[in-house]
Amino acid sequence: MHQKDVDEAVVTRVRVPRKQNREVFGYVESLLGSNRIKVRCMDGQTRIARIPGKMKKRIWIREGDVVIVVPWEFQDDKADVIWRYTGPQVDWLERKGYLKSTP
């Protein structure tokens, strides 16, 4: 296989937020400790997001990461983190127009 064939064979599967589940993109602004982070969401609001236990052990979240959060129904200024994107996935999202360039 030539190098060109290898590049075309790479398939990037990226999860996008589901509107029917109230999921939105967010940028991690700061880590607050005790499994909480401050997230600036794409709907223009800044929320305190909670990292659930099953994610906390497996995925490290840092400032500047792109995540998917689900706002709470009874307190709109709080949310739960359900997904974190890797670097190549963020590049794909920006190329396809889902995200504006990282702040």
Image: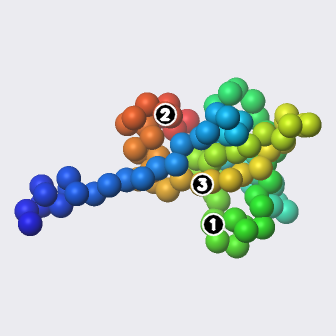
Which sits earlier in the primary sequence, circle 2 or circle 3? 3
Tags 2 and 3 touching, CB below 8 Å? no
Q: Secondary structure at mark 2?
A: loop
Tags 1 and 3 touching, CB below 8 Å? yes
Point out the image quarter for the C terminus. Answer: top right
Which sits earlier in the primary sequence, circle 1 or circle 3? 1
Which residue is identified by label 1? 59
Give residue 84's mark: 3
Which color scheme does this rendered protein use?
Answer: rainbow
In the rendered structure, the answer to whether residue 21 lies left or right of residue 89 reads right
> Tag 2: residue type?
Tyr
Residue at left 59%, top 41%? 17
Q: Position of residue 55 (x, y in %)?
A: 69, 65
Residue at left 61%, top 39%? 18
Residue 40: in sight, yes or no? no
Q: Kindly give the residue lying farthest to the right in the view shown.
A: 74
Which residue is identified by label 2? 98
> How much space separates mark 2 and mark 1, taking CA atoms?
23 Å
Mark 3, other Cα within 10 Å: few <14 / some 14–19 / many ≥20 = many
Q: Position of residue 11 (x, y in %)?
A: 32, 55
Point out the image quarter for the N terminus. Answer: bottom left
> Tag 1: residue type?
Ile
